[in-house]
Amino acid sequence: MPGDVAQITKPDLFARLAQGHAAGVTVVTPNRRLALVLKAEFVAFQTARKLPAWEDADILPLPAFCQRLYEDALYAEPGAGLPQLLAPAQACAIWESVLAGAPLLSVARTAANCADAWRLAHAWRIAGALEKFAHNEDTQAFAGWAREYSQRCRDGGFADAAVLPDLELGSGAGRPKLLVAHGFDILPPQTVDFFRGLGAETVFCRPVPGNSKAVKTSFPSARHELEAAAQWARARLEAGIAAGRPPRIGVVVPELQLRRKEVARVFAGVMRPGWNLPGVEPRAMPFDISMGEPLETYPIVDFALAVLALGCGEFEFATASRLIRSPFLGGADAEFAARALLDARLRQTLPPRLTLPRLIGSLEACALLRTRLELLYGVMQEIPSRTRPPHDWARHFTGLLEAAGFPGERRLDSDEFQARAKFDEMLAEFSRLGFVTGNISMPEALRRLRRLCAETLFQPETPDAPVQVAGILESAGLEFDCLWVSGLSEEAWPLAARANPFLPVALQKKAGIPEAAAETSLALDRRITEGWLGAAGEVVFSHPAKEKDRDLLPSPLIAAVPAGKVEFPSFAPYRDLLFACRALEFFEDEKGGPLASGNVRSGVRVLTNQAACPFRAFARHRLGAEGLDSPGEGLDVMERGNLLHLLMAGIWKEVRTREGLNADLAPVISRAAEKAVNELKLEGRLAQLEQTRLEKLAREWLELERERGDFEVVAIEQARPLQIGSLSFNGRIDRMDRLLEGGMRGAHVLVDYKTGAQLTPQMWMTDRPDEPQLPLYAVSAPEDVGAVAFAKLKTGSMRFMGFSRAKDAIPGLKPCAWDELLGQWKASLEGLAAGYAGGDARVDPKKGLATCRNCDLQPLCRVHERLSALDESEEDGA
């Protein structure tokens, strides 16, 4: 802070502001958060004076003040000589055009970094020396890019925000009589020159450090620390309200942008338990988070961008699914349930990528939806294929959204309304890109609009909240009654020096940029820490004691703060509050009604699911519960299995015997592979690749079949009725061979084709056998079955696996006491059948959470309430 500038206290500042606009007082702050807080404090000051009305104070962030002076000067008489001010998106577009020929991984990201380096260079008055001190590739490249950028701005008559304070802005009508700079910790030379060049009286104002009671403490982890801060904030808030003095409470969270969702979830759960339950009236939370979220993450903006993406050709099925289910698409209220069911059906029929005509052609039972999408398609047909200026694309985008019925029929809530208004602002800003970009294509137009929404942090306006959650920089200059600063471990605070890579480090250090050197960065962080110590009557510094397995120490900047315990009551989670009511009823719900009929339409899969978990079998086959499909690229496991079965069926229908394997099988294999691919309706390159893969697989497998003794195939994909206990099934046998030589001559072998690496015959040797199809076929078949085998068709590990009643029936099968084995299987299968028929619905996964890993019924059975997630790793290692 310049030593020759006067300083005033905050009470004196409010007294001058209370004189109204005639006093000509303007207050500038380093950020928007501090400006809003200062305005609220002035309102409280005037309210305490019991005034019925007063003039609003002129308090605004420094960038907004500069822009206001520019606009005042622009419309004044000499304003014609001022350059045109670029919006951030326009400046970024010029940077991208400068970088267009450079060999970069991401032009957009590098352009953003260049804009930041350009701003820093002007703020600290080192822009003119960039080329002279450029000693490495990065600084040399940036110096050249900066020269080109500056030339393009001069040629176009442009100026950006980085050079705005250097323009002659002090002669306009908006110049204040008294300029008050409030809460500035850092004053770059450009800012100092700007204040002096205004020609107005300039004074500084900073909070007066108060006497505070500070303590430092630690918690087991960052999550425990955050929960404790939320509990403490609620306790202090309730205590203040009870005393008739609602307090101002601050919580500082480093890296708030990365932890924003976690912070919102934890504070909401502590401050207002049960806030998100159905039927609970929405109310403003008693806390406010200073950091917004990218505009594109708001559902109403995400929908708008998804609609516009439909006009750029193919799109993901996930995009179509979101549109169909969105409340912002016209007719959503009237067809809400029908559209949800339609989405579930389309997941089973549509590919992972599709076009709008394909989507429209698949619609059924939703007339309003079809009408809206047809209107949308009609507007898209009017979109010119050639390049157009951004303002034309903005008009087309608006037409597309209107055709889609955006934003729907229901009334928008406050957050949705504000997000839509902000999206309209982004659309207007996008339309102004034509000054610097010229004509662009529609995909490029959508890319630029999407980037605008991604880079714009937005937070809906809410009523003033007593608890403020802020990041490190946002907390500077704020005053509270109680303040908690978290995350102050030795590694996290002070921050490490981080010089800008595009600017010469020597220049940055010489200019005094705090982040450029360890000593200046430390000095800044020490000033911020001292500011926290004087910002509230009660100050808590905390840090996590551990990060995973590493021990963490407190920051040396709080070494002088005494360690102690922070006292506050513990507030139970909403779940615990429900249990504390003791209005609980206990009843057994592990058994459904008995099966009315013994006929099972779901096939042998019923027994597979019953063995894995009785609840899974009950939910899938009795209740019809199924998870939603998600179309994916390529073939899924089931489709690959179907291809394999079709391939083998096609081959053995022609070959039939061991003797037939001696012929030239190349044409047979080719025909079978081609037929399998055609039956699954595969096309193009995928069909060619799959046919080649199947042919290779078949050739390798048939070499193994040639090592067997004489046999003939007597059944291929044969459907037959099966009976076990009281249940009747319709099964399908992959293949049955009859042996024609050896000690088991005349006996039959059941073969089941598999590709999984984890399948072994030992799966059948428990009371709850995995993959029980072959055991069921063996005990139910009228033929003399003497062996069962998995045919493992996996490249590099082809083999038969299973059991037989005699040695060497098939290479790889294990001889055993056959009759005893059949008796064991029969008892196990009858037990599974009896459990299913009797309504057994226990949540009892056979292998704990390992069984549940790929099950989509977890939200229904809530298995995690009964099993520990820690058990899974133990089972996996067994």
Image (tube, grey):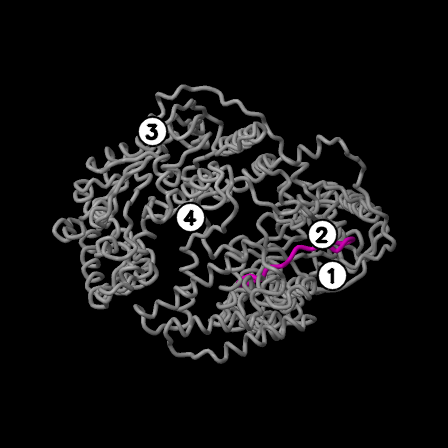
Closer to the chain start, of discs 1 and 2, is 1
Task: Report the amino acid beneath label 3.
Answer: Glu
Determine whether, in the image, residue 228 is placed left or right of residue 195. Answer: right
- Neighbour tally class for label 3: few under 14, some 14-19, many 20 plus, Cα within 10 Å: some
Query: What whole-number distance in Å separates the C-alpha atoms at marks 2 and 4?
Result: 92 Å
Residue 754: percent from left, percent from top: 62, 55
Q: Which residues are magenta?
A: 620-635
> Which circle's residue, 1 or 4, is located before the other in the chain?
4
User: Is residue 702 at all visible to an observer of this figure?
Assistant: no
Identify residue for label 2. 787
Of 592 and 513, nearer the camera is 513
Please identify the quadrant where the C terminus is shown. Answer: top right
Q: Which residue is labeled 4 in the image? A: 56
Q: Where in the figure is residue 548, as x and y percent of width and height?
A: 46, 32
In this rendering, the answer to whether 137 lies above or below 330 is: above
Q: Residue 256 colored magenta?
A: no
Identified at 56% across, 27% down, the residue is 243
- Tag in front: 3 or 1: 3
SS at mark 3? Answer: helix
Q: Quadrant of the N terminus?
A: top left
* Mark 4 → mark 3, Cα distance in angstroms: 32 Å
Q: Amino acid at mark 4?
A: Asp
Determine which residue is flagged by label 1.
Answer: 732
Q: Amino acid at mark 1?
A: Arg
Q: Which label sits in the foreground, 2 or 4?
A: 4
In which quarter of the view is residue 454 placed?
Answer: bottom left
Residue under pointer 3? 530
